[in-house]
Image: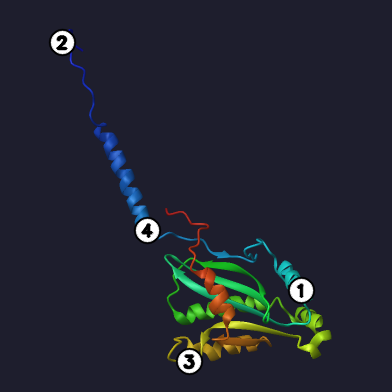
Amino acid sequence: MAGNGVGVQIPLSPPKTQNRKEETYLALQVNLMKRPRKFALLHEMKFRNVSHTNLRLDDVFDRIKDFMTADPGRAYNLFIGTDAQVHRGYTKFITSITIHRLGNGAWFCYRQVIIPREIKSLQEKLSKETQLSQEIAAYFDGAKRETLEDIVIPHIYHGSNFEFYVDIDAGTDEVENKTSKYVAEMVGRVEAMGLSARVKPEAVGASAVSNRYTKTPYRGSVMPAFG
């Protein structure tokens, strides 16, 4: 201040010890950003769609029955399919259940499974897709399929019908599908359950319905980065 001859020192920067702490913190943050995120394993058994969440398989079955009962004179295809997408640090699988009223709409739902690693092997990825579809298809046992068939049987002579498929995300065309050499194995696994399998291009459950949701990044549980 003027008049007392004493200058006031104003620190222009924090003490060096504080600088070192900040530098260490910033270096740590940069290092963490470079690390791939470690995702936790997620294996959902609840389904969802644009209108509903937390649907148990029994809830899904009830909605399928309601959808068919609303117009029992139609032909219906019920199909299950799984598709996968490899993201940074994890592979996302989507399994969908679709009841298609041929020529007049559909109802569907889906669940997700997160494997906390990038599955590079085409055979392993296709095998896991098929396994996850089989897991859900097993719920629709003979008794449940018979219940759905009973809805359309009174109208069968007027064009009503019910078919059930497990869709496999593979095709037999060796030029267009790198998965062609695995088709027989995957189809055999489904047929061993006493079910019918479809492959591309008929396998719309995997290639169209489930595929739509695999591209969206998973924003759920992440494992701690330390350790």
Judging by the rendered image, the residue that carries numbered circle 3 is: 173
Query: Picture coordinates of residue 195 (x, y %)?
Result: 67, 86
**Of the image marks 1 and 2, the number of the one nearer the N terminus:** 2
Is 35 located above or below residue 192 in the figure?
above
Judging by the rendered image, the residue that carries numbered circle 4 is: 35
Query: Picture coordinates of residue 83 (x, y %)?
Result: 53, 75
Q: Measure the alpha-carbon separation of dots 4 and 2.
A: 56 Å
> Which residue is pictured at 61% across the width and 73% down the height?
96
Q: In the rendered view of the protein, which quadrant contains the N terminus?
A: top left
Judging by the rendered image, the residue that carries numbered circle 1 is: 65
Q: Measure the alpha-carbon separation of dots 3 and 4.
A: 40 Å
Q: Amino acid under label 4?
A: Arg
Q: Secondary structure at mark 1?
A: helix
Q: Measure the alpha-carbon separation of dots 3 and 1.
A: 36 Å
Q: Secondary structure at mark 3?
A: loop
Q: Residue furthest top?
A: 3
Q: In the rendered view of the protein, which quadrant contains the C terminus?
A: bottom left
Is 145 located above or below residue 219 in the figure?
below
Q: In the displayed structure, does residue 156 sit left or right of residue 54?
A: right
